[in-house]
Amino acid sequence: MFLSLLRAEWLKLRLRPLGWLLLAIFLVLIALYLSLWYVIAALHSGLIGVGEAELVILSDAQIAQIERQLSFPGIFGAVLGQINGIGGILAVILAGGALGSEYGWGTLRTQLSHAPQRGQLLAAKCVALALLVLLAMVIALAVGSAFALLYSTALGLENYLTAADLARIVLGMGRALFILAPYMLASLACAALGRSVLSGIGGGMLFLIVDIGLGSIDMLGAGGEVVRSLLNLSLQPNINALVVANSRSFGIDQSVFARALDLANLPPTWQAVLIIVVYCVLFYYMAHQWLTKRDIGGPV
Amino acid sequence: MSNEVAVVTAQLSKRFGQRVAVDALDLHIPCGTVYGLVGPNGAGKTTTIGMLLGLIAPSSGAARIFGHDVQRATAQALRSVGAMIEAPAFYPYLSAYNNLRVLASTRGLTTARIDTVLTLVELSTRKRDRFSTFSQGMKQRLALAAALLADPQLIILDEPTNGLDPAGTVEMRKLVQQLAAGGRTIVLCSHQLHEVEQLCERVAILHSGRLVAEGRIADLVQQRHVIEVDVLEGIEQAQTLLATIAWVRSVERDAMRLRVYAPPERAAEINRVLTSAGVAVAAIGLAESSLESVFLELTK
């Protein structure tokens, strides 16, 4: 039964224009991001001339990092980093829309009159969303790779790719999906609570903003050790720990851009995984309760 | 599966806060009948259907479909049920065919029956068109196709002719008759009393959440015949006198005519009572009764 529901959810998500629109937006942003890095690297190397003036925007170490992001295998770390950055916002929209619009269109009622296992329906929706996000990651990594080939050749950068790198891509995609999961589940829970797209996306975004805000306080190092320990229970520092770990596995060191992204300043991996799992379980439980225990349709 | 009763509700009730939407409803819907569920707006018809489909949890009481408790064994109870609830709700970006594919997958069915049901509701030529481009009539027909997807033994139709033009209404009624001829049980919820009278054998009349009448339509109409008495002199006395008789349900006055709600076989007795009391009776006879007059009497 679960597989049948998964097939139904996959069909709905795959054919929904919203998902592809969000992916298109993400790919444009990836293209802009990589092109900007390319321009900076090209200016630094003198490939693009600025006359007699010497343009010093970033340090050599930072430029080296940018060049790594524009070549293999660093491009994978760069794209996965963006998936967990701007991609998080898009994933919240996707998840909130996926459940919220079912209430708005009344299709949840239609579907539940055919298959009343609401818990299984939620699980199938989550798996279908995860599959779509993974598909989007593959496409984004492919597009990023095309840009990397183009720009690394133009910049004369060395590319290499080992079998271990390919295995790391799979691990990195799993890690990136795990990082997105709590935000997507928060969005689903909000959609089930408010029974609308607006509450799903609005609630998910609000949580994202508050969480990033708490993470920023942590990154600024304000408040001392006690406050820091408490803030480390929020998602952002733990997510940053895994994002940095993902980048590091492809040879990218984000700490040259922001010292707070040094692994030494972030929670250990075991804590990051544990905290994210706790948030995921909490949000999934909330979505499950609100979807399964409440009436669909209400008084008429 | 019971061969005798398709739907049984026992003291089925639903409260929304202080408001009682359905109050201790007892229904027995025999297999193979076309059963009408009628009542004014807010009578509790759609809430009852919601409870039968497991979409709305009863506050108390129980509903069983083909012997399975809807609350405890929802999947088994709804396995042979197809429903068309209120306004047709489908994914606007999907075609008619893909909308039915989603529902077929949801039920764990193959796509084999999709073309059959689309042909049955005469939508096969538009099956690749998106739902959002459909007229109201086509949407209603798609909803009926969805209800028939699993070849159900019990079909619940909530206002199936809502928004249809006269030709569409006639077509829909023909379809319902066709389905009923195949031995299926049909629960028809409608405001159109002449439609219910035309299609249904039995009817339940709901008013303010309570069951006010239930039975074969012919019996209900027969029992609710109105005896009309034209009085030449002493109409006030006649009205007062008749109102005291135990088997007279009510008496209404319209100028010099009394409408007496009483068993039709009592007409001669009414005449005798009035003449012996000195009331000058000009004429006495049975007025034509219909489901509409019964409905209006019971729900005023």
Image: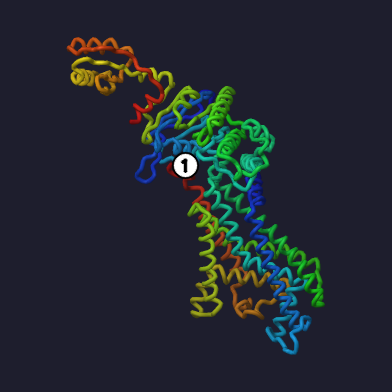
What x and y, as percent, mark residue A21? Answer: 65, 58
Residue extending furthest bottom? A52
In the image, A17: left or right of A286? right
Res. A285 visible in picture: no
What x and y, as percent, mark residue B65? Answer: 51, 32
In the image, B263: left or right of B39? left
What x and y, as percent, mark residue A275? Answer: 56, 66
- Name which residue type carries label 1: Ile
> Does B160 appear above or below A278?
above
Q: Nearer the viewer, residue A244 or A145?
A: A145
Tag 1: Cα neighbours inside 10 Å, few (<14), some, or many (≥20)? many
The chain containing the residue under callout 1 comes to B
Q: Nearer the viewer, residue B266 or B288?
A: B288
> Does A59 appear above or below B213?
below
| Residue B222 location, quadrant | top left
Q: Tag count in the figure?
A: 1
Q: Nearer the viewer, residue A103 or A25?
A: A25
Q: Which image quarter holds the C terminus of chain A?
A: top left
Res. A87 visible in picture: yes
> Does B300 appear above or below A43?
above
User: Could you tell me which residue is drawn at 71 percent across and 83 percent down?
Assistant: A61
Mark 1 — residue?
B56
In the image, B127: left or right of A292? right
User: Could you tell me which residue is drawn at 54 percent across and 36 percent down?
Assistant: B84
Regarding mark 1 in the picture, which secondary structure is present there? loop
User: Could you tell me which residue is drawn at 69 percent across and 35 percent down?
Assistant: B112
What x and y, as percent, mark residue B263? Answer: 32, 16
| Residue B221 location, quadrant | top left
Q: Which image quarter holds the N terminus of chain A?
A: top right
